[in-house]
Structures are given as C-alpha cells and as structure tokens.
Amino acid sequence: MATPALLDHDELLAAWCRVTPNTEFVERYRYELDELGEAVLNPSPSARRQIVLTDVYCHLTEYMGHGAAMSVAISTRSFGIRVPDVVWMPCDKWESFDRDGPVPFVPDLCVEVLLDSDRAQDIDRRIASYLEGGASEVIVVNHFGRVEFWGARGRQPTSTFGITLPLDRMYFEERDVPTILSVRC
C-alpha cells in the first residue's frame, strides 16, 4: 500500500478554505488539518482552560510586548495546519503576510495548554513540528500546571526568552506525576 503524500503549503491552504468557508469566525479555529489535509475538530475549551489561556496570553504580552495572539492557525511543514493555544512573534512578522488565513510559517514562540484537551496524545509531534518549522521555543503547560520549555536541543530548564509563567494553582489538578515527553530533534 502506498504511503500518502504530505500536502504542500498551497494544497493545505486550499483544504483549509474548503473546511472553513461557512464556519463562524470563533468556531473556525476549533478546526485543524492534519498533514494529509484531513479535518480535525477540537472540542471547545472549558472555562477553566480559557482562563489559563488568557492568563498565559496576558503574561506573554506583559513580558514580551505586543505580538502575542490566542488560537491562531499556523502552517507547519510536517503536521498540517495547527492552532496552538497562544503564539508570539515580533510585529514585523505579523505585517509580512495576509492575516485573514493561516500564518504561512511557525511563529517564534508557541504555547500549548493541556488542560481538558486531547492534545496530550500528540504533544510530541506538535513540539517537533513547531520547532522544525522555525519556532525558537515551545512552552507546554501540563494538567498539573507544570510549565515545560522546549527548544531545538530538547527540553530546557528555563525559557530562551526569559519567560516565567506564574499560573494560579486553582485551575490545575492536585497531584503531579512526571510527564513523558520525548522530542527527538
């Protein structure tokens, strides 16, 4: 059986337009496309997850300045069109493309919050695809509120950007068990 071919950027964008043409703007970003152009519907985030996403966004804008956004579709080379929870990039990069469609590249910083989402099952691929696509750093906030920083050389003890995320513990599960995240870059 032949291995299906990955879609290039233009083919992914055409598939994105077919999936989301009549979708309300807010609902559009519940959809992602895998690397073959197949639609993936993500559940709406709970209020708890939305609060944490907003908190992360606010911390990033306070620390890094203008250039952060929530739930923005981005094109990756190896994992289709994905919607990280929060992204950041310098303002000049935001001005370099048509902002009505997916970002045609991976922003400098991508954040994934794993509260009540199915993303934990593919987080390794997300991290790898963001880093392969040009992100300098990926931040993962797990179910217990533990913040992990990932760069080109794997997991890092601190943020490349010097970011700390003092998140309120009340939104996370009580006990923490080590997560198994093994990105091989």
Image (cartoon, rainbow, N blue to C red):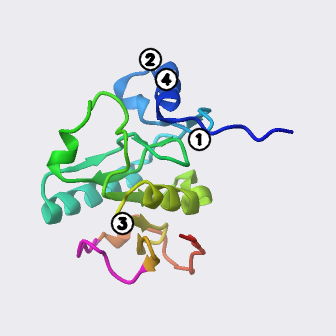
Could you tell whether 31 is left or right of 73 in the image? right
Q: Position of residue 175 (x, y in %)?
A: 52, 79
Whole-number angstrom distance, CA of label 3 to CA of label 4:
28 Å
What's the mark number on residue 35?
1
Q: Which residue is mark 2?
A: 21
Q: Is residue 154 magenta?
A: no
Which labelled disc corresponds to residue 137?
A: 3
Residue 141 in the figure: left or right of residue 90 = right
Which type of secondary structure does the marked residue at label 1 adopt?
loop
Please, is residue 99 above or below residue 177 in the view? above
Say which residue label 4 marks.
Answer: 14
| Element at label 2 | loop
Q: CA distance from mark 1 to mark 2?
A: 19 Å
Compute the Cα span from label 3 to label 1. 22 Å
Q: Name the residue located 29 percent from the left edge and 74 percent from the top edge.
A: 160
Name the mark nearer the viewer: 1 or 2.
1
Tell me if label 2 and label 3 are in contact, CB under 8 Å: no
Badge 2 or badge 3: first in the primary sequence: 2
Residue type (three-letter) at the residue carrying disc 1: Glu
Q: Residue furthest top?
A: 22
Label 4 close to label 1 by CB (< 8 Å): no
The span shown in magenta is 156-166
Q: Position of residue 73 (x, y in %)?
A: 39, 39
Element at label 4: helix
Q: Quadrant of residue 166?
A: bottom left
- Using the rendered image of the protein, determine whether residue 37 is visible from the camera's viewpoint: yes
Q: Position of residue 78 (x, y in %)?
A: 55, 49
Q: Quadrant of the N terminus?
A: top right
Decide: is 175 above or below 24: below
